[in-house]
Amino acid sequence: MTFGVRQFELALMHRMRDLNPVRVEEALGELGATRAELRDAHARWTRMAHAPGAPKGAAALRRILGPPAHRGVRQAGSLTCDVLRWALPSWPGLEFEALAGPGGEVWNQWFVRPRPRAAPAFEELAPWRCVVADLAAFPGAFQGEGGAPHHWTAGFTHRGAGYRALFVYGLLQRLERA
């Protein structure tokens, strides 16, 4: 059995389940996938990432996801990195982005909005529809690392109240009062 886009989406969802198990269960139903398939996709992705001789970094993503829908460059301090993006069926309107350094090592991977849009209203901050950059327009917005690999947090204020947004792979999973 090949490891393709569906299995990659399931591997991402396995980590998202840490913060939003209900939405992941809904997505499994929409995909016609089982929890066992979710666990298997995660286990296979992990084995591939650590297997000697298997493609690593950007090469691994290209092998699984095919050619990127977008390729560009971005400055990261004094280094130039490749920007690679793929559209994934489970997250329409967003793209999975990998920033790769010299030699193809992936420095960051997360969901982004490929085309700028107006800042979302507070009421539009819905799980699986917003990315980290969407929160930049809110007063006092700041970003920080989360408590596990590929987790991210962002804080901001709205109508005088503090909020904390929790992300996995840059995709909003949960919004809570700070």
Image (cartoon, rainbow, N blue to C red):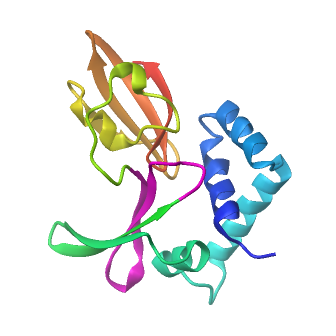
Q: Residue at x 37, y 49 (%)?
A: 113
Residue, far top: 160
Residue, far left: 78
Give the percent coordinates (x, y) of residue 53: 62, 90
Residue 153 inside the magenta-drawn segment: no
Q: Residue at x 69, y 31 (%)?
A: 22
Q: Quadrant of the C terminus?
A: top left
Residue 100 inside the magenta-drawn segment: yes
Q: Is residue 30 above or below residue 159?
A: below
Q: Residue at x 41, y 77 (%)?
A: 105
Give the percent coordinates (x, y) of residue 137: 22, 31
State the count of labels: 0
| Quarter of image, res 52 | bottom right
Q: Is residue 175 above or below residue 91?
A: above
Q: Residue at x 70, y 59 (%)?
A: 42
Q: Is residue 133 above or below residue 68?
A: above
Give the percent coordinates (x, y) of residue 2: 75, 76
Give 28 or 40, whichever is nearer the viewer: 28
Position of 12 with respect to 134 (left or right) is: right
Give 63 or 48, whichever is nearer the viewer: 63
| Quarter of image, res 37 | bottom right
The region drawn magenta spans 88-112
Give the percent coordinates (x, y) of residue 69: 43, 69
Q: Quadrant of the N terminus?
A: bottom right
Position of 1 with respect to 137 (left or right) is: right
Q: Is residue 120 above or below residue 75?
A: above
